[in-house]
Image (spheres, coloured by chain):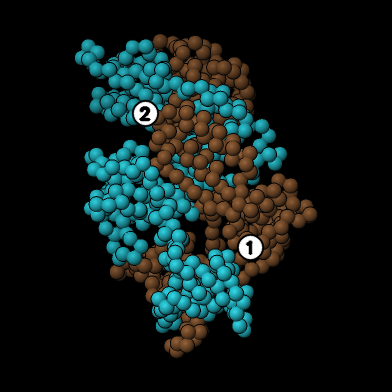
């Protein structure tokens, strides 16, 4: 039976961490059973390169030393691989324990548990009685349903340009985009990417659920400077109609439309079972008001009134 | 969870450091400290004796368990290489830091919890060093209503019943109900799961739809029910729920992003034909009205007609005839 990958990776890690001098590939191959069984040189080399990459993903700093009798040597120095002492009290440990459960994405969930285990090995205390009402009862979860998330997360981390097909909210067909990705942000349960759009020569925000097909990596450097602070949320919030500067006056049937009342800046009782509300007028207000059907009548401004009437006509015609 | 070689390797590297300090450690204690099942731990302990710095040199890790306690008979064989835990990888620092920062911003969280999160975050940033930088490339915001959150949190801790005035968007109405809170969770928005005495069933309440809340002097006695699996999505229509078919143009494709559906078939010119199920199709009248010219309900016919007649009635309010 083939030797399990975890066993092979563990052996490579222990060899690299345990040595004081760089070890050649030949020496490593002679020490690790799975490599001896690897068959020909080519399959061994492929396996070895992949394993080194995997260990680097786990945080191992593997140094490469050239010219060791014409051979390349490898080692993982203790100094560059040890976790500095972290002293966490029981409260802080409990807080990190809560944070580690938040991710609903396999890679980050695994990374969070792995981090906690390293801290535990470094002496982090165990939380006391998890209940007893000492802590907020909240269970926070970060959903990740978008397939584009992981490749984009890695591209942001490694600063690699990407290409993908993107369908704008009202477009009939997706378009190819070339982007230098800066940051990902989750707001109201949806993920967004901010970056530099090469074809448009400007910053853009993309919604991950509108990326169709695969995210492809491009081996090239960034051409635009990455800003110190990337603000995704403000852009998305303005799409959602927040930060509105205008105001609208509507009539609302008494008892109806609680969310409109919650947003209103002023509510006055009107005539015959109707109230008058002043509400912020931002992007998307017309679509929202139409949801309330005959319980809402727009008084002003005229452009909003016209948009709502237009939408109602479209529905009335079916 | 599927056995993942990377996660297992990472765990075993920490495990050897942990076991080194604790000869004769109990399986149950170690599994708890590592947040894994005893079976997962035993499978790690099966692999470790095959690992070492040289399989021929006889310095494999002599780690052994009788199923109850764990003994490592040659901790010096691996030299000092396993004496200290390994530094945090970029993904590890990112996963914890991003989550901790997000939770710390939740309105309504107890101040003692917020302080502990912020202190832990600062220490973790220092320990992670330069790899902590990558964590600035991900961020998460949870939405919550601080006052309502704090009341629900207190009611859960004190096992007390709540009284709510709650908004139902499906009916555009506020209803008063008593609820025995079970749990509080955040997935984008913040929600309470509880036993609702009005509907005599388990219900999930979104905190920003709570118009009014009071903690009652009554003991909460929710029936013992299995908590919902949050990874499966909040809305899970039942197989027997009536079918609704919506046809949308390109501008209505968002419907497929917001509504769990059985199928979404591409139409010419970038449209979609979306089939979903709803326990209460009448509640989708709002959707039909919102879509305007971007889409229409095809099935059921009564729902389509109720949207048309609502639109006609609304137009009458503007003095329009259709």
How many angstroms separate mark 1 from mark 2 (CA)? 51 Å
Question: Could you say which is closer to the camera, residue B51 or residue A291?
Answer: A291
Q: Is residue B56 above or below residue B134?
A: above
Q: Which mark is residue A56?
A: 2
Tell me if mark 1 has few (under 14), some (14-19) or many (20+) residues whose alpha carbon lies within 10 angstroms of its own.
some
Residue depicted at x 31% and y 42%: A226
Whether residue A11 is visible to the viewer of this picture, yes or no, is: no
Q: Quadrant of residue A54?
A: top left
Question: Residue B221, how many percent across, how many down?
Answer: 75, 53
- Rendered brown, the chain in question is B
Residue depicted at x 22% and y 11%: A69
Residue extending farthest to the left is A70
Q: Does label 2 lie on the same chain as label 1? A: no
Q: Chain of mark 2?
A: A
A43 sits left or right of B51 in the view:
left
Q: Nearer the viewer, residue A12 or A174?
A: A174
Quadrant position of the C terminus of chain B in the picture: bottom left
Query: In the picture, residue A314 is in which quadrant?
Result: bottom left
Image spot of residue A65 (x, y percent): 27, 17
Which residue is drawn at the image coordinates 27% and 26% (left, top)? A45
Element type at mark 1: strand
Q: Which residue is mark 1?
A: B211
- Could you say whether the residue bearing mark 2 is in a helix, strand or loop? helix
Query: Residue A101: where, in percent of width, then height?
Result: 54, 40
The label nearer to you, 1 versus 2, is: 1
Label 2 Cα neighbours within 10 Å, binned few <14 / some 14-19 / many ≥20: some
Say which colour chain A has. cyan
Give residue B3's position: percent from left, percent from top.
47, 35
- Quick check: B226 left or right of A79? right
Vertical comparison of B177 with B126: above or below: below
Which mark, by number, is residue A6?
A: none
Closest to the observer, A140 or B194: A140
């Amino acid at each position: 039976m083939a030797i399990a990958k975890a066993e092979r990776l563990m052996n490579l890690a222990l060899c690299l961490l345990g040595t004081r001098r760089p070890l050649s590939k030949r020496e490593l191959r002679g020490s690790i059973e799975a490599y001896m069984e690897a068959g020909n040189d080519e399959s061994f080399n492929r396996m070895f390169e992949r394993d080194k990459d995997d260990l680097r993903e786990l945080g191992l700093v593997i140094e490469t030393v050239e010219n060791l009798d014409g051979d390349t040597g490898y080692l993982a120095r203790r100094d560059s691989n040890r976790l500095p002492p972290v002293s966490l009290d029981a409260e802080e440990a409990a807080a990190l324990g809560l944070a580690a459960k938040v991710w609903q994405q396999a890679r980050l969930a695994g990374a969070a548990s792995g981090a906690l285990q390293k801290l535990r090995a470094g002496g982090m205390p165990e939380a006391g009685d998890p209940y007893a009402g000492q802590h907020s009862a909240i269970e926070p979860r970060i959903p990740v349903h978008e397939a584009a998330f992981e490749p984009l997360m890695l591209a942001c981390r490694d600063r690699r340009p990407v290409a993908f097909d993107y369908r704008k909210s009202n477009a009939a067909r997706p378009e190819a985009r070339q982007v230098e990705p800066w940051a990902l942000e989750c707001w109201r349960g949806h993920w967004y990417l901010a970056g530099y759009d090469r074809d448009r020569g400007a910053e853009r925000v993309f919604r991950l659920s509108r990326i169709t097909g695969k995210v492809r990596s491009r081996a090239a450097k960034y051409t635009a400077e990455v800003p110190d602070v990337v603000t995704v949320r403000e852009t998305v919030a303005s799409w959602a109609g927040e930060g509105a500067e205008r105001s609208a006056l509507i009539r609302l049937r008494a008892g109806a439309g609680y969310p409109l009342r919650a947003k209103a800046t002023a509510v006055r009782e009107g005539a015959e079972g109707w109230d008058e509300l002043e509400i912020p007028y931002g992007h998307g207000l017309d679509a929202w008001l139409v949801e309330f059907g005959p319980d809402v009548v727009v008084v002003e401004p005229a452009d909003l009134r016209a948009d709502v009437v237009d939408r109602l006509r479209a529905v009335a015609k079916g | 969870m599927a056995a993942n070689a990377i996660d297992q390797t990472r765990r075993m590297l920490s495990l050897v450091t942990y076991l080194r300090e604790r000869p004769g450690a109990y399986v149950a204690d170690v599994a708890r400290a590592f947040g894994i099942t005893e079976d997962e731990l035993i499978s790690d302990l099966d692999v470790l004796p095959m690992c070492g710095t040289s399989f021929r040199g006889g310095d494999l890790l002599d780690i052994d368990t009788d199923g109850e306690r764990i003994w490592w008979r040659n901790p010096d064989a691996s030299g000092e290489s396993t004496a200290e835990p390994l530094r945090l990888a970029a993904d590890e620092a990112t996963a914890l830091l991003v989550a901790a920062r997000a939770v710390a911003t939740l309105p309504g969280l107890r101040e003692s919890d917020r302080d502990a999160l912020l202190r832990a975050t600062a220490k973790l940033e220092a320990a992670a060093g330069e790899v902590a930088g990558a964590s600035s490339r991900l961020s998460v915001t949870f939405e919550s209503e601080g006052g309502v959150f704090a009341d629900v949190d207190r009611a859960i801790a004190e096992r007390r019943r709540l009284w709510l005035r709650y908004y139902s968007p499906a009916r555009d109405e506020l209803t008063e109900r008593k609820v025995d809170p079970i749990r509080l969770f955040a997935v984008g928005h913040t929600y309470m799961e509880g036993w609702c005495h009005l509907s005599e069933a388990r219900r999930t309440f979104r905190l920003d739809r709570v118009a009014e809340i009071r903690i009652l002097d009554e003991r909460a006695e929710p029936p013992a029910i299995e908590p919902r699996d949050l990874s499966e999505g909040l809305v899970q229509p039942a197989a027997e729920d009536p079918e609704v078919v919506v046809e949308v143009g390109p501008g209505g494709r968002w419907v497929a992003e917001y509504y769990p559906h059985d199928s979404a078939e591409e139409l010419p010119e970038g449209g979609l034909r979306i089939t979903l199920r709803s326990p209460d199709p009448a509640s989708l009248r709002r959707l039909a009205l919102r879509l305007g010219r971007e889409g229409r309900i095809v099935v059921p016919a009564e729902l389509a007609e109720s949207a048309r007649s609502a639109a006609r009635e609304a137009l009458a309010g503007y003095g329009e005839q259709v």
